[in-house]
Image (cartoon, rainbow, N blue to C red):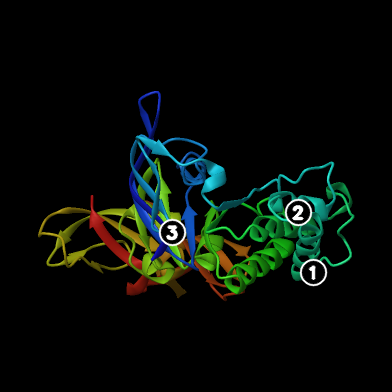
Amino acid sequence: MSALELSRVSRFYHDAAVLDSISLDTPTAGVLALLGPSGSGKSTLLRLIAGLEPLDAGEIWLGGEIASSPSRTLAPELRRVGMVFQDHALFPHMSAGANIAFGLHQLGRATRDAAARAWLDRVGLAGRADSFPHELSGGETQRVALARTLATQPRIVLLDEPFSGLDQVLRAELRGFTLATLAETNTGAVFVTHDASEALTVADKLAILRGGRLLQAGAPRDTYDHPASPAAAASLGPVNAFSSRVERGFAATPFGAVTAPNLTEGAHATVIVRAEAIVLRPGAMARLSSLRPHGAHDLAILEADGTVWQALVPSRSELGDHVDVTLQPSGAFVFPA
């Protein structure tokens, strides 16, 4: 059984579709990552799952029970859905222990306080029960927020860009900690992000949203290796796009032809080549106009036949002003124009 099922979910604001017929599901103890830019509908989808807004079409099922339809919206407090926000949303006038205990009001005082201390110990904050949010670091605050959410034993946890305000090192540390805690507690999650590398890292299942529509959903590796459209490919990293025409089963580019098995002869096509699928060596095919550090790679800018391409090549590559170019088939795709 899926922890969450969305069936043709739509939401309209002033007759404009913010979400248009979204169908998705996530396993009971897996992470569904929602990837998309601002305005793609990610946060709206979380609000619908949480029951904070009604939907206009479709259905939302939680744990095998219907939670939302156009005629019915189960109250948020009855859904057993936890939320972790970017700004943590801790009560500033309550201590860390009191923040966690707040959602356990159905328990007796002593049991509630003991559970809060146990969760603080579980997230590595033993001894901080009496500390207030302003006395905690950003990472500690996020751990308290996670503990407060998981203490209520939710069916599923919604994480709305929870680490975007943190530095890169702390972000990676907390992301790993959060994933480990979710796995340990056998809790499913929906993780919203606009960062492609983060989405690929956290997801058991990846869904790409754009303009309120679902571009593609599937396992992260399969989604990356087999994009459904140019927009889906570009959502997961830098790409080059080139207009071409299919001849004898191939689409030509300045750097060689790419196989186009599903397009008809003479069809107009768009060739998409991932930046890391371009291999450079000294030669004469293209002018290397720029080569700059880009983390573990160097970003190369190429010019040939009036077009400009970008490539990610091994750092400190020994290349001259002109290069030969090879396209790796695994990172080159052809779509109908």
Which quadrant of the figure has residue 97?
A: bottom right
Query: Residue 10 placed where, x, y %?
Result: 35, 39
Query: Residue 80 placed where, x, y %?
Result: 55, 53
Which residue is disc 2 drawn over? 101
- Amino acid, disc 1: Asp
Which quadrant of the figure has residue 198?
A: bottom right
- Residue toward you, 241 or 70: 70
Marking on residue 63: 3
Q: Secondary structure at mark 1?
A: helix
The residue depicted at 29 percent of the width and 68 percent of the height is 256
Which residue is disc 1 drawn over? 121
- Amino acid, disc 3: Gly
| Disc number lying in front (1 or 3) | 3
Quick check: marks 2 and 1 in contact, CB under 8 Å?
no
- Residue toward you, 249 or 127: 127
Gap in angstroms between the C-alphas marked 2 and 1: 14 Å
